[in-house]
């Protein structure tokens, strides 16, 4: 059994704890043993020793920077820029490994190309020839269509639908219930507001909302 720590003890951190519990149940049913032992949460804003859903807070990110043994770590921070900043800091510690956590209910094809440190939550579907780079977060009940490419540190909030041949650049955040039609490109570090319908390309470093999407901030 591998030891794992969860960065972020907020709402999504607790959901990732639940995701790991679900993986353990499935692993025990299929292989006779659990895959993960949750060592604790990592959170700069909570006193070490505090129990969150019966799991202790170990400390802040400094705890991981100085960790001397092999440890698996998952970053449960939704905000893309913050997640990138945290990962770049702790990656300097070569004892830290970043697994992909995929809920047992997720449907995906065998040709999925996936990097490291990704989280894919329950009920999501990734179809054929999808590419997913590093440290992406695909929340509950999302769909990703054929030949889509999602670059690193992208966040899809619940119930996002991405159609085929779509390209999502790094650090993009796509709000709950948004829809992207086929062949769309979203530029890096842009934010798509909840419920947005994207029918044209969105440039980088902007915020778009509405149906159809319109840019409200650059």
Image (tube, rainbow, N blue to C red):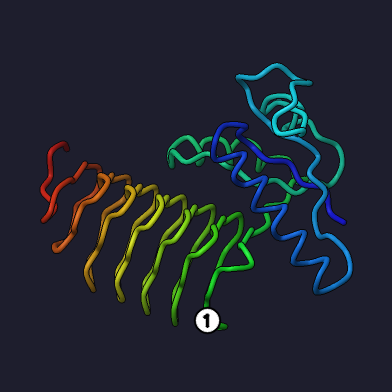
Task: Locate residue 99, reporting x and y percent.
Answer: 68, 57
- Tell me the quarter of the image containing the N terminus: bottom right
Residue 110 lies left or right of residue 93; in this view the side is left
| Residue at x-position 67% and y-position 45% | 17
Quarter occupied by residue 110: bottom right
In the rendered view, tell whether residue 158 sits above or below residue 57.
Answer: below
Does 80 appear above or below 24?
A: above
Q: Which residue lies furthest to the top in this view?
A: 47
Picture quadrant of residue 163? bottom left
Q: Residues within 10 Å of mark 1 (few under 14, many from 20)?
A: few
Q: Report the quarter where the C terminus lies.
A: top left
Q: Is mark 1 on a helix, strand or loop?
A: loop
Q: Is 97 or 23 nearer to us in this picture?
A: 23
In the figure, is residue 106 to the left or right of 178?
right
In front here: 102 or 185?
102
Q: Which residue is drawn at 77% across and 59% down?
A: 24
Name the spot of residue 141 as percent of width and height, x first. 44, 61
Classify 175 as above or below 185: above
Residue 168 image offset from top left, x and y in percent:
33, 60
Is 175 or 171 nearer to us in this picture?
A: 175
User: Where's residue 18, x and y in %?
Assistant: 66, 48
In the rendered structure, the answer to whether residue 135 lies left or right of residue 19 reads left
According to the picture, the residue beneath numbered tag 1 turns out to be 109
Residue name at image x 71 percent, y 34 percent: 53
With respect to residue 120, does 214 lie above or below? above
């Amino acid at each position: 059994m591998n030891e794992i720590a969860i960065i972020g003890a907020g709402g999504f951190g607790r959901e990732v704890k639940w995701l790991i519990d679900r993986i353990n149940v499935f692993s025990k049913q299929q292989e006779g043993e659990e895959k993960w032992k949750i060592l604790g949460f990592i959170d700069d804003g909570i006193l070490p020793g505090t129990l969150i859903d019966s799991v202790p807070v170990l400390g802040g990110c400094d705890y991981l920077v100085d960790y001397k043994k092999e440890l698996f770590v998952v970053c449960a921070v939704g905000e893309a820029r913050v997640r990138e900043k945290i990962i770049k800091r702790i990656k300097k510690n070569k004892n830290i490994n970043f697994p992909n956590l995929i809920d047992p209910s997720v449907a995906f094809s065998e040709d999925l190309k996936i990097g490291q440190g990704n989280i894919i939550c329950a009920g999501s579907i990734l179809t054929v020839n999808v590419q997913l780079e590093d440290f992406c977060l695909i929340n509950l009940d999302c769909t990703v269509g054929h030949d889509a490419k999602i670059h690193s540190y992208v966040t899809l909030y619940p119930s996002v639908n991405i159609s085929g041949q779509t390209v999502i650049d790094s650090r993009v955040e796509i709000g709950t219930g948004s829809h992207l039609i086929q062949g769309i490109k979203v530029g890096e570090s842009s934010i798509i507001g909840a419920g947005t319908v994207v029918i044209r390309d969105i440039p980088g470093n902007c915020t778009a909302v509405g149906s159809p999407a319109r840019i409200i901030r650059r």
